[in-house]
Amino acid sequence: MLRLLFTKTGEAVWMSHLDLMRLFQRAFKRAGLPLTHTQGFNPRPSVSIALPLSVGVESVCELLDFTLDGESVPCDEICKRLNKTLVPGVRVREVYDTGRKLKELAFLDCAITLEYDKGVPADAQVKLRDLFSADSLIVPKKGKNGIQDQDIVPLIKNLEIIKAGEKALVLQARICCQNPSLNPMQLVAAIGLHLPELKPDFAKCTRLEIYDLNQEVFR
């Protein structure tokens, strides 16, 4: 099993997870890098992405595992050949064969930009800091079993609120991403629910880095 680190930015953020999987499957084929397939009645190419992204979220730290069929190809060569076939916004940063077990993945860093058309409301930073410093913060979460309340405070390792000009704030947070996980956009949902006067006109999120339980960079 090989692993690659890739980015998904720009217009590519509007690509769904399934479309991204198809993109990589076709990229491997066009690059002359045949993938192995699963066994059974419906064989599928052996590619999987560690933490599927929501549509609209960009990332510079995505992981994809794959297995090539036939002769081995140097990791640097795989990287070069794939980047020649991928679309703008999706780019392989590195390919390696020493990936750790995905169950060791625990945290991720993200930056959530809150944009206000009429300017950042007065005392917004103080109010947001108080909101996310509460003992608990309940936000509805839609899952396989319907909508359930989720207390997001235990899933936030740390959070900083930074002013980014007259019309934007940035939430820089380290959150749990697995067992249990927190969707970064739940932070925006919490603002809209508990501080509706601070609900942004637009919000965007970027994944910056991923970590293990010891908060060491995960690869």
Image (spheres, rainbow, N blue to C red):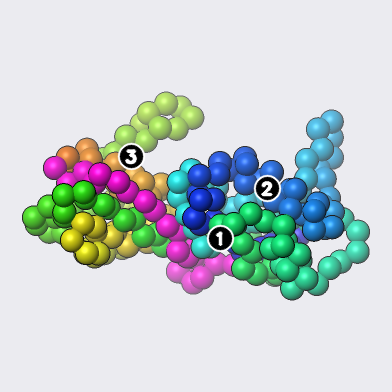
Residue sitting at x 24%, y 57%: 168
Please indicate whether residue 40 sits to the left or right of residue 56 in the image.
Answer: right
Disc 3 residue type (three-letter): Gln
State the image quarter where residue 199 is shown.
Answer: top left
Q: Nearer the viewer, residue 70 or 145?
A: 70
Disc 3 to disc 1, C-alpha distance: 29 Å
Could you tell me residue 150's position as x and y percent? 33, 39
Could you tell me residue 180's position as x and y percent? 44, 48
- Do the residues under discs 3 and 2 have CB atoms within 8 angstroms? no
Could you tell me residue 56's position as x and y percent? 45, 46
Per the image, the residue denoted by label 3 is: 150
Q: Does the segment drawn in magenta span residue 211?
A: yes
Within 10 Å of disc 1 (Cα), the crowding (few <14, some 14-19, many 20+) is many
Could you tell me residue 107's position as x and y percent? 45, 60
Relative vertical location of residue 33 with respect to residue 41 in this rendering, above or below: below
Indicate which disc residue 23 carries: 2
Quadrant for the N terminus, please: bottom right
Per the image, the residue denoted by label 1 is: 7
